[in-house]
Amino acid sequence: MTTILAYLFSAIATDLLADTIESRQFPNFCEGYFMCLDGIIEYENFTFTNKGQSDVDGFEPKLSAMSHRIIFAASEAKKLAKKFRVIYGFHGDPNGKYFISFDADEIEKSKTIANKFDNIEMIYMDGKNQALVNFEPYIDEGFVLFTWCDSNNFLTDKYPGKLKKPK
């Protein structure tokens, strides 16, 4: 049953993605699906991922909901002479795989949002070579937010057991 539901969800999402490439409208893939979590998830070492779909404007409320944890993580990084890193620059599909790169407006909006926080290093990735990037060192070091849509799905699939809930 789970396999059938996953297949149906994948087929529906693929159709929605195909319809949205040109219009740059990003559907809420969670709408109408049972047990769909949408938000920023925190793991050990102050590693944060994004679960769910949104445009940059839709991401800001998710970030606001976790801003107290991001601010704390950035301050802890500063104590260690590190920066809290934010990886941004593209949208992911429901599996967290590269979907489309940010346009200039989305890049500027992201920078504006980041300016609200202290001790942040913005790391731009257009996402086209996402499959080749080794994200494991980022996870190991922590102090990082993977912002792209459904980065949580991508990272937990690519690195099984690597992301652990904080103790």
Image: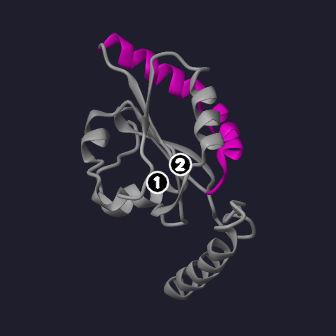
Q: Which amino acid is tagged 1?
A: Asn
Q: Which numbered marker is on residue 109?
A: none
Q: Which residue is mark 1?
A: 152
User: Mark number for residue 50?
Assistant: 2
Q: Earlier in the sequence, mark 2 or mark 1?
A: 2
Say what secondary structure mark 2 lies in.
Answer: strand
Q: Residue at x 54, y 65 (%)?
A: 93
Front one among 36 and 75 = 75
Q: Answer yes or no: do the residues labelled 2 and 1 have beta carbons within 8 Å?
A: yes
16, above or below 129, in the image: below
Residue 126: image x %, image y %?
A: 45, 50
Q: Position of residue 47 (x, y in %)?
A: 40, 38
Tell me which residue sits at (54%, 80%) in the image.
6
Note whether residue 160 is visible: no
- Does the segment drawn in magenta span residue 143? no
Looking at the rendered image, the quarter that the C terminus falls into is top left
Which contiguous range is marked in magenta? 53-80
